[in-house]
Amino acid sequence: MFAFLIHALTFIVSAALGLILADLLLEGFHIDWSDWWGFVLAVLIFALIQSVLAPLVSRLTRRHAPALLGGIGILSTFVSIVIVVLIPGAGIGISQPLAWIVAPLIVWIVTAVATWLVPPLFIKDDRRDRRRA
């Protein structure tokens, strides 16, 4: 249970950081900071959609287009961003075509690196300790 909470918290925080970084770096990507609750809602919805879409897209891709397996994370990130942008109260907007391409890459890179590096800092791997003994 602890490991699940660490993974979930890491993903939510890294999604927020990725969206903030996209807002800072991309001219056509904007977060409405006057309604900060909308941003929190957007992050939670994004994380939920992403966590549901990634395994679904993975299963479909593995079955119908195995050559595309490497792009699952970027594809599910793109779809999640599209859905969050379409939600009126989420406070995230994209106004330029380049931002539609680069924003998912930024968010995907931030979440991928964070979910790869952060959980091992908090979750002890008992298998490694058993091998040493």
Image: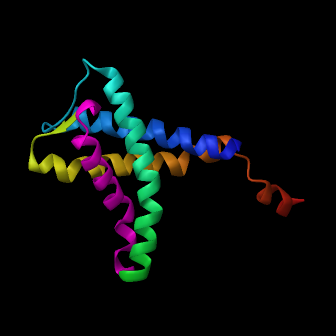
Verify whether residue 90 appears in magenta.
Answer: yes
Q: Which of these two is toward me, 63 or 102? A: 63
Using the image, determine if residue 45 lies above or below residue 36: below
Q: Quadrant of residue 29?
A: top left
Q: Quadrant of the N terminus?
A: top right
Q: Position of residue 17 (x, y in %)?
A: 38, 35
Kindly report the secondary structure that dominates the magenta region of the rendered protein: helix
Q: Which of these two is toward me, 55 or 29? A: 55
Using the image, determine if residue 88 lies above or below residue 70: above
Give the residue at x 35% y 23%. 37
Q: Position of residue 77 (x, y in %)?
A: 34, 53
Task: Identify the residue at the far left of this view.
Answer: 96
Verify whether residue 133 appears in magenta.
Answer: no
Q: Left of 125 or right of it: where is 85?
A: left
Q: Quadrant of the C terminus?
A: bottom right
Magenta region? 65-91
Using the image, determine if residue 34 lies above or below residue 101: above
Task: Identify the residue at the far front of this view.
Answer: 88
Q: Quadrant of residue 22?
A: top left
Q: Position of residue 120 (x, y in %)?
A: 63, 47
Give the residue at x 46% y 72%. 59
Q: Left of 9 or right of it: where is 122?
A: right
Q: Quadrant of residue 23?
A: top left
